[in-house]
Image (cartoon, rainbow, N blue to C red):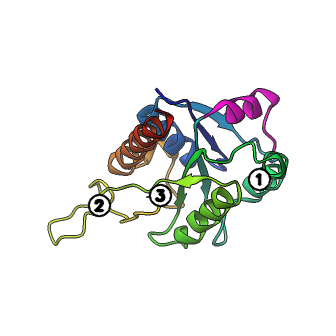
């Protein structure tokens, strides 16, 4: 079994709910990036020991939050020593609008993973794109690059749609399965 870590920042709690669902699917440890953009020493140890790192950030102004960016900049230490080379990576995001430029956030996470020498895993979930599709279907937002969710700006984290959370859980499950294949 592979060790999986989910590192994330959440501004209002929606990305936290998503991170919890990803972690449930992957049987992963959560590593929180706090409101000042910091990760605890234990969090860094968890990331260093992980076989797979799943990164999450809300999409703010077309990219990751500044707190996540601060964390990303701090990963220059493992980058310099290539400590995370050949780890499995993946990413997820949430925004208030259906598009919200979430793909830009996933591209940022993908680029960070590639700079670390990582191996990227996408969702492998077919999109809900037929006329019969409902907003609560799995992968309704239709992302292959990483898990995406949409939470209206006036909704609470408790109001996140079960379909988006199930998409996140299935995504975490996939990342853990792929990481286990690389571990063998």
Task: Give, as a single range, the part of the protein colored magenta.
Answer: 38-50
Which residue is labeled 2 in the image?
135
Q: Residue at x 45, y 44 (%)?
A: 175
Report the mark closest to the observer, 2 or 1. Answer: 1
Residue 145 position in % (x across, y down): 46, 63
* CA distance for labels 2 and 1: 30 Å
Kindly indicate the quadrant of the structure image that contains residue 8: top right
Residue 141 position in % (x across, y down): 37, 64
**Magenta portion: prevailing SS class:** helix
Residue 12 position in % (x across, y down): 63, 48
Q: Earlier in the sequence, mark 3 or mark 2?
A: 2
The tag on residue 67 is 1
Disc 3 is placed on an element classified as loop
* CA distance for labels 3 and 1: 20 Å
Disc 1 is placed on an element classified as helix
Q: Residues within 10 Å of mark 3 (few under 14, many from 20)?
A: many
Q: Residue at x 80, y 32 (%)?
A: 40
Which residue is labeled 3 in the image?
146
Report the mark closest to the observer, 3 or 2. Answer: 3
> Quick check: can you spot residue 25?
yes
Q: Residue furthest front?
A: 184
Q: Nearer the viewer, residue 17 or 175?
A: 175
Q: Residue furthest left?
A: 132
Disc 2 is placed on an element classified as loop
Q: Earlier in the sequence, mark 2 or mark 1?
A: 1
């Amino acid at each position: 079994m592979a060790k999986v870590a989910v590192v994330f920042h959440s501004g209002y709690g929606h990305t936290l709910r998503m991170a919890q669902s990803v972690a449930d699917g992957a049987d992963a440890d959560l590593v929180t990036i706090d409101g000042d953009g910091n990760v605890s020493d234990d969090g860094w140890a968890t990331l260093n020991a992980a076989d797979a790192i799943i990164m999450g950030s809300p999409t703010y102004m077309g990219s990751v939050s500044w707190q996540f960016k601060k964390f990303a900049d701090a990963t220059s230490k493992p980058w310099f020593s290539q400590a995370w080379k050949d780890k499995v990576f993946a990413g997820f995001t949430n925004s208030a609008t259906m598009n919200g430029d979430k793909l830009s956030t996933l591209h940022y996470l993908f680029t960070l993973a590639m700079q670390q020498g990582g191996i990227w895993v996408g969702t492998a979930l077919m999109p809900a794109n037929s006329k019969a599709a409902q907003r609560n279907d799995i992968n309704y937002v239709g992302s292959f690059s990483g898990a995406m969710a949409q939470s209206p700006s006036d909704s609470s984290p408790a109001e996140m749609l079960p379909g988006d959370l199930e998409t996140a859980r299935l995504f975490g499950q996939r990342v853990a399965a792929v990481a286990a294949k690389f571990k063998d």
